Amino acid sequence: MTDAYYFISDLHIGGDEQLGKVDFLDELLTFLRTLEATDEDAELIINGDAFGLWEFTDVDGLDKLDALVERYPELFDQFEATGARIPITLIPGNHDYELAAYPEYVDRLAEFNLTLRQEVSITRRVGDAVVYVEHGMQRDPNNRIPDFGNPYANPPGYFVNRQVTSRAGRLSERGKFNWLKDVQAVTPMTQIPAWMLSNYFYREMSPWLRYVSAPFLLLFNVGFLYVLAFALDAAGLWSLPMDLIERFLGLFGPVGVLVDLLLTANLAVTLLLLLVAIPLFVFARDVRKTLRRFGIDRPEERESSADTYLTAASELFASDPTVAVFVYGHTHRPAVTELEGGVVVNTGTWLKRLRRVESAFGVLPPVFYSWYQLNYVRVSATDDGEVAVDYELVEKPAPNEETWFQRLVTSTPKRGTAIPSRTVVRPTTEASESVSAETDASDR
């Protein structure tokens, strides 16, 4: 029986132009070499999105894999070397869904000692328990494959990816900063508009325009209070706040006059925005009602992606006591969560990650700080019959791509919740008896 299973996912290797850059290639090669040298009876499982086949638009079919082999020869040589020592198993994700649709990929990948399982999910036995493994796209309405295995059964996410992600890879190098290629790191996808606005303002906008507009944006909150004081004074309700503001600014001479001019300009802009916002609010509210009437917008169905997988895991643990660990990826958010009956593992991603930080001043766009959270998960049986889930970080420094202005207007981002390095679950008696019975039956 295998001693340990190693899990990684969401490498997204490959794609058009700038998407083909693999920032973590050295770390991945080191990890594979470590497994090649291990004395364990182990297996590496890549549970989906090993490759970015969706991101290729200039080649088709098996030519995509040939393009990968040509572009990353050292990686595929290492796959072959590590796969000669321990089994390496791949299951398709949504971004490399083509792996599930064409049997030719099985033989081609086998040349590099990679075993492709063209299935939505697989299981592995660890001690007296079972590990359930999936990529996770089937639980995502935008990326669920309606007819798994059908090469033409592409979900909505496929078409969005072809039009947005692939094009971003082709256009990224044209920007003042090579940032568009990181669109895959933006999760959830609803953050893409804010991310693009942020990068336009801080990176692509003409510097003189940015620094001219910055004072107005920085003083927007103060300007709002100025509008309130002005309205109270104009209505004859309370003139004291306006008098205090004028006296205070008068203490600073010409600088105070300049600030007063900025606040007055903000007053005009704020009043204009309020006038425009009223009809827009009415319009947006009517559109929302229409969408709900057609069943497109359903607030009651909204839940976080993590909740979707935790619910699915809870149902699986309850229906099949043999399952002690539920492994998935897809969302790029690594986590290890204990539930009644087992442990839920999100294998995260090896892509760059982004953390949104709101501006500390005014209404400046948020800043998306980049960092890496490369990781792998090891699942094994302990000597006393328990199942251990070990979460291991692969060190890689943050790229520090933020400009001085971005750092000036935001606070230092906080690190995410720490994931425990080891989580242990004890299979139930039912699980042990069920697996033992299955083993006896298979032996016969």
Image: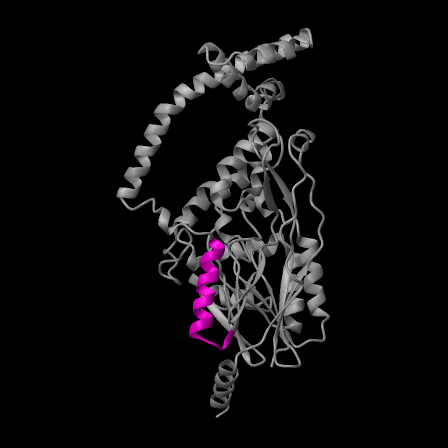
Q: Main secondary structure of the magenta part?
A: helix
**Position of 66 relative to 314 (above/below):** above
**Camera sees residue 97:** no
> What segment carries the magenta color?
305-323
Pick whichever, 264 or 349, lies toward us.
Answer: 264
- Is residue 321 toward the left or the right of residue 388 in the image? left
The residue sitting at 54% across, 44% down in the picture is 186
Q: How many marks are shown on the rendered structure? A: 0
Visible in this render: residue 31? Answer: yes
Question: Looking at the picture, does residue 182 appear above or below residue 326?
Answer: above
Residue at x 44%, y 11% (from the top left corner): 235
Give the x, y percent position of residue 417.
62, 53
Image quarter of residue 45: bottom right
Left/right placement of residue 297 relative to residue 402 reads: left
Q: Is residue 210 magenta?
A: no
Q: Position of residue 395 (x, y in %)?
A: 71, 54
Q: Position of residue 372 (x, y in %)?
A: 65, 49
| The furthest residue to the left | 293
Give the position of the N terminus as an image quadrant.
Answer: bottom right
Q: Is residue 319 magenta?
A: yes
What colour scheme has been applied to the protein in the rendered image?
Answer: one colour
Camera-nearest residue between 32 and 422: 422
Instruction: Name the spot of residue 246 as percent of width and height, x first.
Output: 60, 10
- State the residue at coordinates (70%, 54%): 26
Q: Is residue 248 left or right of residue 190?
A: right
Position of 125 relative to 215 (above/below)? below
